[in-house]
Each structure stands twice: as structure tokens, then as C-alpha cells.
Amino acid sequence: MAAKKKRAPKLDLNPSSADRWTTCTASPKFVFDNWDRIPPSDTFFNQEGTTAHEVGAAFLQNRKPDEADKEKCPVPVNAEMQMHGWDYAEYVQNLVKPGGRLLVEQKLPLFYMPGRNAIVDAGVINPDEIHIVDLKYGEGIIVDPEGNLQESIYLGCILKSMAPVWPGPDMPVFLHIYQPRGRNAEEPFKVWETTLREVETTMLDKIQFAARDVLAEKNLQFLPSDKACQWCPAKGFCEARQRYLTQDIEALSVISDQAITLPAPDALSMEQIAAVLKHGSNIGKWINDVAGYALSFMKGGGKIPGNKLVLSRGGNRYWSNPAEAAKLLLKDTVLKENEVYERKIIGPAAAEKLLGKHKFTMELTNMVAKPPGSPVIAPVDDKREEYAVDGSSEFSPVVELEEF
């Protein structure tokens, strides 16, 4: 039986979709006006995430998950959820200092949209710092807390609820993403340390201005991008999205006698959709082959217009001398042995999270090592410095670029 569809009651200005509507300000009204064309979003993965949030909240509140409430637990609680929920709760509890206040699944008014609320997974208001923790249960790409608009909204809602008591602009703020099943994750969490001033000036202002324009239906623009369109429910029939994709694909016309265009997915026949599903993976493999050749070509000293070689971020930090690092953590910090040792010594990022940057000593800093980055291709406007290569050491191009 097909899932029952519901009419969108209001414009979608949810914190979770902030990357979309703060960039593509025309999208909320477009989604609302075309709600009948959007497939149901009540998938198993969404239901699984909802249940996992209830499990984590239950452990934080010292109670059992309310499995009888199908809105809180739409799928059964399993052992994996219980394990991750317990670890998540322990992670959050360790952030609370004496005199601190813990918020769990707290419903707070949205500061930019009267009459609407946000639900904060976990917030910790300590006397000298604020922590926002967002639980992500998905197994996909790891979410980055740096510049995270969703968590910034949660912080803004908490700050509004604290009025007229307002922390100083230099108060430390920590945005945490707890994603225990993230793809290729070294640790279940990522943390961004910033200040209240930076969040206000770089993110909260952007959110406030975008919401004002959307609600007033002024200055609305379709501005598709990879990030803005990624989770847009209307991207399958959005003409702006199709033009954005076509601009990229038209560049491939140099390899074909005919212009290449991308029709909207809902304009395809079932036979065409079947053909895309059958052959699409091969197209992706061919694109990867081209990218691989381009990387080898540029590592050998070749030049491709509009691109350059840069170094990737490199691997995760690690202790150059784990045994000595463990001794220093136990001797010179407040960490206990069961916090320092897991099956192996905790990594530099975990130690820094538990201690805070201001207590991460110079001796420990000197013991932190990180693998170097490897050459990757990036657009010429990428902020990273161009990586110079010795063309004789790796690859000698056998054709000129014009021939390619």
C-alpha cells in the first residue's frame, strides 16, 4: 500500500533543510506549491532515525524508550540502537560541568519564524561554555559541524530562551555531530570549537535574513548548487536544477557531435528510466576513469584548464608515541584510565574533546602527527595552495592537452 501523502501545512523553513532555503530562497514556496508532486518521505531510514533519537533521549533521561508510542518509535528498538544510544548519552553527559544545564529533545521556538518550533537533540549550557550536540544515525557521508547551519539554529533558539540573560560574545561554543555509523568514521563524533560572536555574524545573520525574505516573499531566487539541491524534495522536477546540471553536462559536447542535455526525471518514460538505471553505473564508471586519467596527467606535470593540483586534508591525527601520550594524559590531566584507554589509546581529537583546547598541553601537541595529504584536483578558485609537482618523477604525458 502506498504511503499516505499530506499537504505541507506551512513553508518548509526547518533547521535540517537550512542549507537549502538560506541559499535557494525560492525553494520553500516552490516545494509548498508543488507538494502534490513530491513522493512521500516517510522512509524506513527516517523512521529508524526517529527511533534512535528516542533511544538516546531515554538513556539521557534515565528512562526506557517509549516503544508503545509509534511516533517516537516507528520501528522496533534493536541491540545496535541501544548500544549507540548508550554511548551517545555517555558522550553528552561528559560535557556537563558543575552548575551546567542539560537540555534533551527540547522543543524551543524558532527565533526566525513565529509559531514554529525546533527540537534540540541535546544542549549543554555550562557556566563558561555552550555545547550543541546533533545526533545523526544515518550510515552515509559524515556530517561536518563546522559552519553547520542546523546546529547554529539550535544555538539561536537556546539563546533566545535564555533572554534577558545573554552570554558574552566571546563565550566558547562547541558544535558536535554525533554520528556513530558514519561512513569511514574514525570516531563517532566531530566537534567544531568557535565563539558566540562567530556563530552570530557568520551564520545566524544569514539565517535571519534568508528567513525574512522567504516569509515576505521578497528577493526570492532559485540558486541551485550541489549542497543546496542534495536533499531538496523537488529537485526531480525543478527547472532551475535541470539548467544547473545542463550547464555542466553541455561541456561534454566536445566529445559528441550532438549537444548533451538532461531532461527532468519526471519527463522520462518508464523505458527511458529503465535504461538509465541499467546503464547509469557505466556512465559513472567512465566519468571516474576520466577523473583518474586527469589526476595521473596532472601529477605528471600536465595542465588542464580551470583545474589545479592541491593536497587533500590528509589522514586523521594520531599519536606518534602512544605509550608516552597515555602516560602524559594520566599524569598531567584529569582524565581517568578508562577514559584514556579503550582497546587502544584514544586519538588526539578525542583527547582534545575531553580536555578542551585550552588544556591540551604543548607536550601533547608536539606528539600529534598527521599523514600528509595526497594530490587531488580542485577548481582554480579553491583556497588551498597549488601543489607543485616534478613531472619527471611520476608520469610523462604522451599527448598534448589539445589532442585529448
Image (cartoon, rainbow, N blue to C red):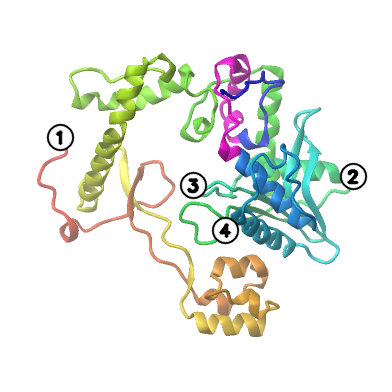
- List x then y, in percent, for residue 389: 25, 57
Give the number of the mark in front: 3 or 2. Answer: 3
- List x then y, in percent, for residue 29: 63, 18
- Does 132 sit above or below residue 273? below
Secondary structure at numbered mark 3? loop
Instruction: Give me the disc on residue 93.
Output: none
- How far apart marks 1 and 4 lie (CA) works out to 47 Å
- Asked whether 95 falls inside the magenta stretch, the response is no
Sequence-first disc among 1 and 4: 4
Q: Is residue 170 visible?
A: no
Residue at image x 81%, y 27%?
Answer: 115
- Does 258 sit above or below residue 163? above
Sequence-first disc among 4 and 3: 3
Q: Name the side, left or right, on which 304 lies relative to 236.
A: left
- According to the picture, the residue beneath numbered tag 3 turns out to be 141
Closer to the camera in the image, 297 or 136: 136
Give the residue type that dot 1 points to. Answer: Glu
- Asked whether 25 falls inside the magenta stretch, the response is yes
Residue 325 occupies quadrant: bottom right
Residue at image x 55%, y 46%?
Answer: 138
Cβ–Cβ below 8 Å for labels 1 and 4?
no
Residue 70 occupies quadrant: top right
Secondary structure at numbered mark 2? loop
Instruction: Give me the disc on residue 164.
Output: 2
User: What range is drawn magenta here?
Assistant: 18-46
Instruction: Give me the disc on residue 188.
Output: 4
Give the residue type that dot 4 points to. Answer: Pro
Sequence-first disc among 3 and 1: 3
